[in-house]
Amino acid sequence: MPDIVLATLNAKYPHAAFGLRYLFANMGPLQPQTVLREFTIQQAPLEIVETLLGDEPRIIGLGVYIWNVEQTTSIVSTLKRLRPGIVIVLGGPEVSFIDDAPPVCDLADYVITGEADFAFAALCGDLQSGKRPQGKWIHPPTPNLAEVVLPYDLYTDDDLAHRVLYVEASRGCPFTCEFCLSALDIPVRQFPLETFLASMEQLFDRGARTFKFVDRTFNLNLRVSRAILEFFWERYTPGLFLHFEMIPDRFPGTLRELVARFPAGAIQFEVGIQTWNDDVAVLISRKQDNAAAEENLRWLRDHTGVHVHADLIVGLPGEDRDSFAMGFDRLVALGPQEIQVGILKRLRGTPIIRHDAAYRMLYSAEPPYEILQTADLDFTTMQSLKRFAKTWDLIANSGNFVETTPWFWRDGSKAFGLPFSGINKFAEFLRTEAGRTHGIALPRLLELVFRYFTTVDDADPQQLANVMFRDYRRGGRSDVPLCLRPYLSSSDTKTIQPSAVAIPQRQRRHTS
């Protein structure tokens, strides 16, 4: 039986625990006594406790995040009731701030803040030799990345086949956006490039084709980003998928030339716009050249096959509904394949709380600590914006309505105008007709969309049915939705065939 168990609850099974793999890789001589256990938040806490106790460990290390803190609290409480002698060690962003700690920290024996690559092994070594630290809180120094053992050989063949492979060439962020934990992680530090690429080659040779880079600023160090892109271009094969977080206003020609080589679907850029409002950006210490960001997004859409996932945030201090709406419409006009409308969260330790009094920022007390209202957005307006965000996910981000989505703001429409107002009006229709804006099965959603356009906007039902049917077939479906059947001829259903575009599924569903 192992003496030490490293465990966490992932949001979903495909989300492999990257941090735990780092800890396990750096256990040194204690690694043979250590086992890694992964669970999901969908599993019952008592079942997880039973599995953990089945290992009969002396020490349990648990990774705590915003998505699993409630379940982890229940698990730790039960473990301490059943086996009070087991040493519980916590780590992760949700427990890394002593002045802003969740209740689970009171139940644990030790809490390691920050990067624990070496600190967890050192603590376990001390405990195994009978040395118990005096205090609960352990604040290790920032590790030298050149000394960190990389964890990539810990990805199993099953991981390669069924899970997202997280990788990182750097840690840290040079920016100080007050809503983000990365604002506290300065400076940017690089892993030795040669060692990192050797690990990527081993993964590639084992059959890995999906690489999700968690670097906050992939295109900050152009020498490194070019080397990584060149590495993958030299090994390009159909099915390769690379995800990077990109600084939106830094995209010089030397990088553009490389990115443009890759075919459609091979690269996804997550581009954090967050706000187009310059005054709001200054308020939250965010530096961004909006004109450059806009030009870069337009170039990516017009000249590359990159799948662009852009982010905007609802609820930032100083931003009202009209400002957000204008920013959203501006982003839609640039044509990213996906726009993630995120709700501001009060992440533990972030300096966004300095605006609480001046801008009357009120957050939910429960994870994920979303904003409830501000001085510029009352509770009712905030709820409406949350419905808007969920509706945008249902319609545009789902990829089920690629051609249909622009109908919400199309020229000649008597009911709608700009993208925000068009989607927002449909969100309120959904609230009235379906009682919700999430969890709606596709056949029901199709019927609601069709009824909306043909009743609210007097759209031509036959033209609309053909557009919606093309969208439906784009997803590879071969049946004919019930609500569209009266308006489609037999020639329509034969002519419009299921899509067979040879790009990854995530991108395929957004192909226009």
Image: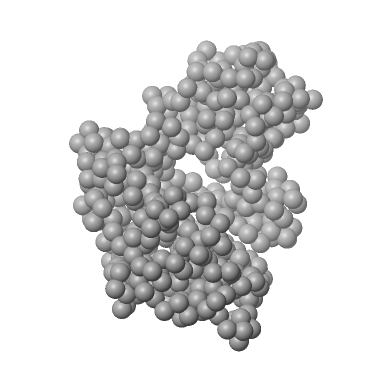
Tell me the residue at 35%/71% (across/down).
457
**Outermost residue, right direction?**
1
The answer to whether 45 appears left or right of 314 in the picture is right
Decide: is 1 above or below 213. above
Going 70% across and 45% down the picture, which residue do you hit? 154
In the rendered image of this protein, does residue 397 appear above or below residue 371? below
Q: Is 327 situated above or below 159? A: below
Residue for point 60% across, 87% down: 491
The answer to whether residue 147 is seen in the rendering is no
Whether 65 is drawn above or below 460: the answer is: above
The total number of labels drawn is 0
Q: Position of residue 495 (x, y in %)?
A: 61, 85
Is residue 376 visible in the rendered structure shown here?
yes
Residue at 67% in and 15% down: 82
Given residues 276 and 49, the one toward you in this image is 49
Residue 481 shown left or right of residue 94 in the figure: right
User: Which of 168/158 is in front?
Assistant: 158
The N terminus: image quadrant: top right
- Structure colour scheme: one colour
- Give the percent coordinates (x, y) of residue 99: 38, 24
Q: Could you say where residue 378 lies in the image, as x and y percent from the top left?
A: 26, 42
Q: Is residue 403 left or right of residue 209?
A: left
Relative image position of residue 348 (x, y in whole percent) = 41, 33
